Amino acid sequence: MNWYDPIDSDKHYWHRYSRFYQRHLAAIGNGASILEYGVFQGASIRWLRRIFPQAAIVGVDILPQQPAWPTGPGITYLTADQGDRPGIARMLQTLNRTFDLVIEDGRHVPAHQANCLAETFPYLRAGGKYVLEDLHTSHPGHANYRQYCAPGTPDSIHLLLLIEHRRASGQALRANDIERISQGGVFTQADVSRLADMIEEIDIFRRATLPLRCFACGTDDFDFVAMTCQCGIDLDVLGADSMTAVLRRGTIRE
């Protein structure tokens, strides 16, 4: 398996997620059931097909299926709006299946990330992995957070850091934890309690190295002191950029 060149996906050349994903996804079987939010130009679907050639892959996007998207046996596309939480719920009910792997790489709006996490995580099989890509867009220092969230609004990054911290400290979530994370309306108190109960493991990656090339101009003509590309893009080694989280579902209790 070639994990290090996901067919021109920014997962590899910009975010440098590949080694992190190799560690987490290598145990997923070839015949896995996979769902990805956010198809864009189809690079990630091509990568998933190469890594898991016998998998059943569902790509979900706000756009209808595009001519450039990869097709073939086991690849299905559905149209959904990540901002429409009831619509996501209906889509998942219609699919009526569980997944070994879910990758959320869609609109990168904090509420959209939360909608997909809250609605889709229950459809993971025990031991299944949920990948929340571009988690940094829910960071209070990121432009998306500042555009879409009122200051101090808790979202996915706050929820995951809280759950991880309580787990690492050997503690359960407290009532005031649940109340605080649900303030602002991104998650409900029921969402927080249910996700904390289902998530068994959280591993968060943050890029601390330079991208292999620029996502804007495609070159690696970098100023290694200013930490910018020659085209003016900030390489953002230390800022709110290139974070992803892998969440594992625990044993499903009936």
Image: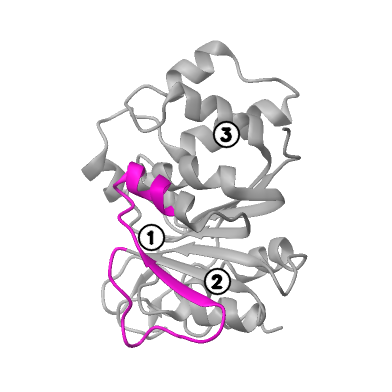
Please tell me whether residue 42 belongs to the stretch shown in magenta. Answer: no
**In front: label 2 or label 1:** 2
Disc on the earlier residue, 2 or 1: 2
Name the residue: 41% across, 64% down: 60
Residue range of the region highlighted in magenta in the rendering: 62-91
Residue 144: x percent and y percent? 28, 49
- Amino acid marked by disc 3: Leu
Question: Looking at the picture, does residue 163 appear above or below residue 23?
Answer: above
- Amino acid marked by disc 1: Gly
Residue reaching furthest left? Answer: 147
In the rendered structure, are the residues bearing label 3 and label 1 in contact, judged by CB atoms less than 8 Å apart?
no
Name the residue: 41% across, 24% down: 182
* Residue topped by disc 2: 57
| Residue 106: assigned label | 1
Please tell me whether residue 69 belongs to the stretch shown in magenta. Answer: yes
The residues bearing labels 2 and 1 have C-alpha atoms spaced at a distance of 16 Å
